[in-house]
Image: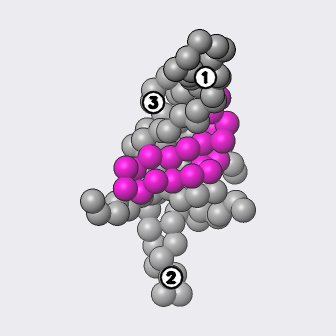
């Protein structure tokens, strides 16, 4: 499997644009480029119940929900909207910018 390029990076502020978590704004904590999946900090985890093989109590485990990168867009705090991303070359460095406003994307770390 090859590594796929993604329009988002770890630490980017994003908005979920489709699915049951639609409208949630958060920050990417983990990005898996091979499967094009991102984990977002503000999405509530799901509970999974595990039964023991013998009689006894079951365990509750919280699982973080992955979201495909095609279902998220970058969020621009200055304009309070989400936008697609473009690339410009400045000083021989490739920079990302918001297509709606033209502002450059700054990493939040």
- Which element carries disc 3, helix, strand or loop? loop
| Mark 1–mark 2 distance (CA, rounded to whole Å) | 44 Å
Q: In the displayed structure, does residue 20 sit left or right of residue 75?
A: left
Residue 29, horizontal then vertical, whole percent: 62, 51
Disc marking residue 47: 1
Range of residues picked out in magenta: 24-44
Q: What residue is shown at x 37% (from left), y 56% (from top)? A: 34
Q: Nearer the viewer, mark 1 or mark 2?
A: 1
Disc marking residue 93: 2
**Is residue 41 one of those drawn in magenta?**
yes
| Mark 3–mark 2 distance (CA, rounded to whole Å) | 32 Å
Q: Nearer the viewer, residue 57 or 17?
A: 57
Height in image: 91 above or below 1?
below
Q: Quadrant of residue 61?
A: top right
- Which element carries disc 1, helix, strand or loop? strand
Residue 8, horizontal then vertical, whole percent: 50, 56
- Which element carries disc 2, helix, strand or loop? strand
Q: Earlier in the sequence, mark 1 or mark 2?
A: 1
Height in image: 99 above or below 91?
above
Q: Nearer the viewer, mark 3 or mark 1?
A: 1
Residue on which the image places disc 3: 18
């Amino acid at each position: 499997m090859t590594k796929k390029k993604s329009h988002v990076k770890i630490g980017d502020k994003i908005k979920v644009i489709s699915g049951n978590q639609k409208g949630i704004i958060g920050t990417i904590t983990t990005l898996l480029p091979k499967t094009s999946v991102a984990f977002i900090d503000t999405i509530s985890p799901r509970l999974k119940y595990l039964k023991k093989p013998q009689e006894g109590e079951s365990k509750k485990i919280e699982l973080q929900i992955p979201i495909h990168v095609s279902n998220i867009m970058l969020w621009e705090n200055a304009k309070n909207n989400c936008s697609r991303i473009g690339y410009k070359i400045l000083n021989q460095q490739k920079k990302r910018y918001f297509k709606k406003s033209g502002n450059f994307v700054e990493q939040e770390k």
